[in-house]
Image (cartoon, grey):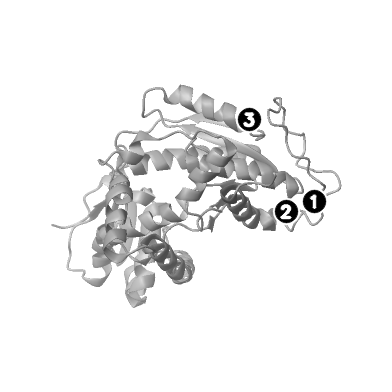
Amino acid sequence: MGPGPAVAELRAAVRLGLADLAPANPPPANPPPANPPPANPPPANLVPGAVAAAGVPAGALVLVACSGGADSLALAAAAAFVAPRLGLRVGGVTVDHGLQPGSAERAASVAALLARLGLDPVRSVAVTVPSAAGGAGPEAAARAARYDALDAAARDYRAAAVLLGHTLDDQAETVLLGLARGSGGRSLAGMAARRGCYRRPLLAVRRAATTAACTELGLEPWQDPHNSDFRYARARVRHQALPALETALGPGVAEALARTASQLRADAECLDELAFAESGQLRGDCSDPAGLEARWLRALPAAIRTRVLRDAAIMAGCPHGALGAGHVGAVDALVTDWHGQRWVDLPGGVRARRRDGKVWFTSTAAGNSKGSESVGRN
């Protein structure tokens, strides 16, 4: 008897998301046992008889980030089935943010479940989420801590990719949140299907399919209480805003928002590449890599200039999720509306100021005399 329709849909999505990592002639893969014994990773990332894809070792390891929720649990199960058939190994990482009672026990339970699904190696990581992360909210602080842990796992295991369980519904929520905040094209472009080692193979899959897949496989996902806590904006969007839009406008709102993100992403990525090239050129002309020539910045199109300034601020230490359009606009005014105004304080203890015809990004952290000097004028 074949898999249920939801399981088949997820396996197809994962297969598509991993196809470029597969060796040219993967060996036949035997399905993992239902309850495999613990195993150590092989000493080398090699699968006998396999030929590596370009730049990827045969038998490369793919990690699945799994919270134990329906989306990531269904992704882990699909990857456990698909990866060996593509000549790849698959492991798992679960992150304990320590924000809820019993989180350590839950992380251990998720890790054990991943091992039973056949993922190996499996790592459970406890992280500390700071109460105030440079102006970032609790969601952004937890996300930053989580990605730090995933980055470390990817480096330690030399993983070819890390799979994330974001679905079409998550993408729609991200776009709607960006619209509500008045964000620019970068935010409205939503989450990338691929960025660095991270991949989101389920971005075209509805959340209902991941829930159904867990049911078909007899898996019991964890229900994160934060997902229904209306103190969080995403929970309000998920349970109130999107259903209200569906009621008022008819079905298909989530799909339309996801299409909007896809259409904007190509444009946003092109502008990002142009901004990166300009940033490199401008920095090459500066005596100090933290300073950008104001006259050259002013000559750039606004869409490129603001990206250059935003990237410079992030490289100086601004948390990615805490830097908003208002911050970037205030820094941009140091270029386009300069009248001797004071510096601009940014999230993460970063200060932007104009001096000697350049825009500088420095740290205001205690003990950093250069970043703390009062060089702006009121």
Q: CA distance from mark 3 to mark 2?
A: 22 Å
Q: CA distance from mark 1 to mark 3?
A: 23 Å
Please give the residue where the numbered disc 3 appears in the rendered image: 115
* Secondary element at tag 3: helix
Residue pictured at 40% horizontal, 66% vertical = 256
For residue 60, side relative to residue 200 (left or right)? right
Say which label, 3 or 2, has the lower sequence index: 2
Q: What residue type is disc 2 on?
A: Ala
Residue pictured at 60% horizontal, 55% vertical = 13
The reply to whether dot 2 and dot 1 touch (C-beta < 8 Å) is: yes
Please give the residue where the numbered disc 1 appears in the rendered image: 26
| x and y percentages locating residue 373 in the rendered image | 25, 48
Q: CA distance from mark 2 to mark 1?
A: 7 Å
Residue 246 visible somewhere in the drawing: yes
Against 98, is 330 above or below? Answer: below
Q: Using the rendered view, name the quadrant where residue 178 is placed.
A: bottom left
* Secondary element at tag 2: loop
| x and y percentages locating residue 224 in the rendered image | 39, 35
For residue 267, side relative to residue 26 (left or right)? left
For residue 301, side relative to residue 89 (left or right)? left
Q: What residue type is disc 1 on?
A: Pro
Against 309, is 336 above or below? Answer: below
Q: Using the rendered view, name the quadrant where residue 360 is placed.
A: bottom left
Residue pictured at 36% horizontal, 50% vertical = 321
Say which label, 1 or 3, has the lower sequence index: 1
Foreground of the two, 262 or 266: 262
Please give the residue where the numbered disc 2 appears in the rendered image: 22
Residue 65 visible somewhere in the drawing: no
| x and y percentages locating residue 314 in the rendered image | 39, 53
Q: How many marks?
A: 3
